[in-house]
């Protein structure tokens, strides 16, 4: 009984994450969020989410690879 209570206590943080797929998805979101946190004031999260959705859905990107590289270089220099 004690082990079950410990598991429930530890698992209380993962409310709403009842499947391995949900837990994996949330973990990926945590990783992305941690990587974006230092630049959060310099990006529009809604646009970041749109780009992710576009790429996952196989839609055409709104920027060419060349444009993305140029923007990345300018952004990296500003950091």
Image: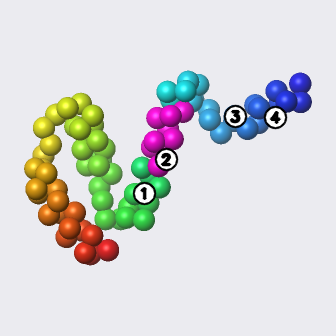
Q: Mark 2 points at which residue?
A: 30
Q: Looking at this view, is 49 or 57 the one in front?
A: 57
Does the stretch in magenta take in 43? no
Q: From what the image shows, is residue 46 above or below residue 55?
A: below
Give the Cα distance between marks 3 and 1. Answer: 25 Å
Does the stretch in magenta take in 30? yes
Q: Name the residue under label 1.
A: 35
Magenta stretch, residue numbers: 23-31
Q: From what the image shows, is residue 77 above or below residue 12?
A: below
Q: Is disc 1 in contact with disc 4, using a CB cutoff of under 8 Å?
A: no
Q: What element carries label 3?
A: helix
Q: Name the residue under label 3.
A: 11
Q: Is mark 1 on a helix, strand or loop?
A: helix
Looking at the image, is mark 3 or mark 4 earlier in the sequence? 4
Give the Cα distance between marks 2 and 1. Answer: 9 Å
Q: Quadrant of residue 42?
A: bottom left
Q: Is disc 3 in contact with disc 2, using a CB cutoff of under 8 Å?
A: no
Task: Using residue 52 as the reference point, say whether residue 19 is left or right of it.
Answer: right
- Residue at far right of view: 2
Looking at the image, is mark 3 or mark 1 earlier in the sequence? 3
Q: Name the residue under label 4.
A: 6
Q: What element carries label 2?
A: helix
Give the Cα distance between marks 4 and 2. Answer: 24 Å
For label 4, count other residues whose C-alpha is less than 10 Å away and answer few (under 14), some (14-19) or many (20+).
few
Q: Is disc 3 in contact with disc 1, using a CB cutoff of under 8 Å?
A: no
Q: Residue at x 22, y 37 (%)?
A: 54
The number of numbered discs placed on residues in the rendered structure image is 4
Give the Cα distance between marks 3 and 2. Answer: 17 Å
């Amino acid at each position: 009984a004690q082990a079950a209570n410990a598991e429930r206590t530890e698992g209380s943080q993962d409310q709403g994450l009842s499947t391995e797929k949900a837990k994996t998805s949330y973990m990926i979101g945590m990783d992305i969020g941690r990587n974006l946190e230092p630049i959060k004031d310099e990006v529009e999260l809604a646009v970041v989410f749109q780009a992710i959705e576009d790429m996952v859905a196989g839609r055409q990107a709104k920027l060419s690879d060349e444009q993305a590289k140029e923007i990345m270089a300018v952004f990296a220099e500003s950091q």
